[in-house]
Image (cartoon, grey):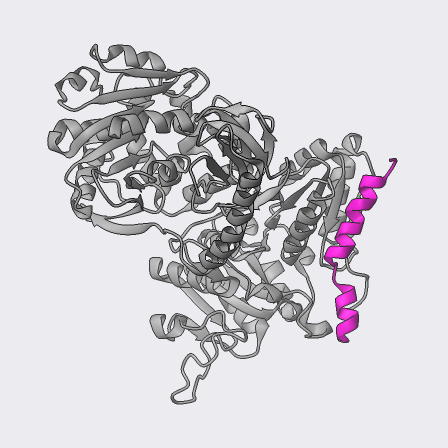
Amino acid sequence: MAKKSYRQAINEALAQEMRRDPTVIVMGEDNAGGLGAPGEDDAWGGVLGVTKGLMPEFGRERVLDTPISESAFIGAAAGAAATGLRPVAELMFVDFMGVCFDQIFNQAGKFRYMFGGKAVTPLVVRTMYGAGFRAASQHSQCLYPIFTHVPGLKVVLPSSPYEAKGLLIQAIRDDDPVIFLEHKVLYDDEEEVPDEPYTIPFGEANLTREGEDVTIVAMGRMVKFANQVADGLETDGISCTVLDPRTTSPLDTDSILESVEETGRLVVVDEASPRCNMATDISALVAERAFGALKAPIRMVTPPHTPVPFAPELEDLYIPSPEKIGAAVREVMEHGA
Amino acid sequence: MSDAIQAVTMPKWGLAMDEGMVTVWLVEEGAPVAAGDELLEIETTKITNVFESPAAGTLSRRLVGEGETVPVGALLAVVAEDGAAEAEIDAFVESFRAEFAVAAEAAAESVAAEPESVEAGGLAINYLRAGTGEGVPIVLVHGFGGDLDNWLFNQPALAEHHDVVALDLPGHGRSAKDVGAGDLAFLSETLAEFLDALGIDRAHLVGHSLGGAAVLGLALDHPKRAASLTLISPAGLGPEINRSYISGFVGAARRKEMKGVLQMLFADPGLVSRDLVEDVLKYKRLDGVAGALETIARAVFPDGRQAVVLAERVGDLAVPVQVIWGRRDEIVPPAHAEALPPGVPVHMIETAGHMAHMEAAGEVNRLIAAMTG
């Protein structure tokens, strides 16, 4: 099996679904690139090259370069989805969602419910998120808790190349609007990814480590950190389960609760701002439904409640680090000891 | 260096294994051992298994502690003939370790044996070939829902003295997912075409479960292709099959369900690790797999019964046949062995379930080696 990067895995998922299903189209800012400049077709493939190569194979009819007007093209994608296509629209940075809130929340997310189940909206919005890219406050946020908050949307956070391909194919085949969030620091990560198309179901957490002492719930890039921490603590005799929910909506609450019932200790790692994020949501879930199983207070590892800093030293301090995760695990282990 | 001192090294169980952890030693240092005695338990990310002594003598050195992880090929222990001098053993260990360091560096740069693909009957069939490349090859055929990795404890051991080919049946592993009618005739015929494609005229056929029925069908339809038959917990000898296993395997989509289903395969359910479950789920997520499994299950096990029973026809075969069964098999009843014509040797392994070639690999390897010469 060949090793592929997160970027290649996403590109392959798009290409395979476009081959399989002629209603799948791709649109976004410079998704092909070079429009109007002779000899420069497919110049960009999106700002980080994820869609490169799609336009030469599928043509400008199915790979659309859009104006820098998110409210227009996300709205167009929602309409296309409601009328028979399966658009995959690229909202370059999730930070730009502010200008297309209405199209996503009030339109795409509500069609099925408000039309009495008679309409489907097979829309995928791909978007980059996350800090660590030296891209400053307006291009570094983790806004997935906001989408998770809205009923009618599915929210996907692939944590590795294998996950990215299977979850994106599932997203494209899904009949509901899906927000597919790609962590920009993961694009060059590599692992073995099957050449064949495959799907990973939504709402089932991935157990990336299995242990007895502590449950670490982490998503996106934080899964990688949590795995590192779990492997490091193993040699000190602390065995951790690492749960990657994969999708924050639907959320696999059963796997989280079952794991905490077994370990009695919970650390939630979330790169999103600390108020009303997945860490608070999952902590509340466990406090409400598995309180009796807890042997120590729940610990949340999150950034501080500030914009993502631009100064590299501050940005590095801002992001939940393996060291902070490790310290949180040791703290819950030492509680009452 | 004489054979009086033998190295016990970390085995390579499957393509993905590059290191293993010693979980527990079963023999004290200085104690006598016979070839085939259980020496220690080794855990990989996928599975835990016992490792047997390759030689007889005294376990004169245990070089890796319990809980330690070392790379494949690293020295675990030394078995020395009685009378071997301590200094000679120390020199052996030192020289082995020096050579291993060099070899490990070279291995890091070279490419290990990789599965290949060949077209058979219009289908891409994935297979792994290992061993001497000489003599009549041994061909290993897995069961329903399995793949060539099921032979991870067998292929490397058998490959020391034979040319050994393990394949993924259509609809399985990394082979094409088109399974035609999905019946036994289709599987046997694909096997025949696979042998053609590799230029193998005759082979020692080893089949597990559904693969057992498939190689039996192949030997009956093409008697000249079989040099011998080893059937492990084979289908095709009686009407019963554990229908909740078949429907569970086809239907399970989530980790927990899948784990419960896979645990039915082993006498020791602890053998079903997180990685093993994840590998099966990864396979089941591939496009086309669900349909392939449903088609095969419907054709071979309609209404939860085996469609084809070949037990009586085993007597028609002119080549040696042996049957190996785990007494604790919960998938195909060991009692089916009673339907075989007299004279067919049946080896019951008391401690194993449906996967005797994994749970009692040493014994199964010895039985296959005895059959194949």
**Residue B320: x, y in percent?**
20, 22
Q: Give the quadrant of residue A266.
A: top right
Magenta span contains residue A326: yes
Above or below A323: residue B169? above
**Is B237 inside the magenta-drawn segment?**
no
Magenta stretch: dominant secondary structure: helix
Q: Is residue A249 above or below residue B270?
A: below
Residue at the image point whose x is 78% and y is 60% from the top = A303
User: Which image quarter: residue A277?
Assistant: bottom right
Residue A278 in sight in this render: yes
Point out the image quarter for the C terminus of chain B.
Answer: top left
Q: Residue at x 72, y 74 (%)?
A: A136
Residue furthest to the right: A336
Q: Which residues are magenta?
A: A311-337
Vertical position of residue B76 compared to residue A123: above or below: above
| Foreground residue among B91 and A32 | B91
Which sits in the foreground, A178 or A195?
A195
Q: Of residues B271 and B189, which is closer to you in this image?
A: B271
Q: Position of residue B249 (x, y in %)?
A: 42, 31
Instruction: Indicate the position of residue B351 as horizontal and vertical percent values.
Output: 46, 18
Give the image location of residue B174, x and y in percent.
Answer: 35, 47
Is residue B44 in sight in this rendering? no
Q: Is A324 situated left or right of B25 in this image?
A: right
Q: Quadrant of the N terminus of chain B?
A: top left
A252 or A186: which is nearer to us?
A186
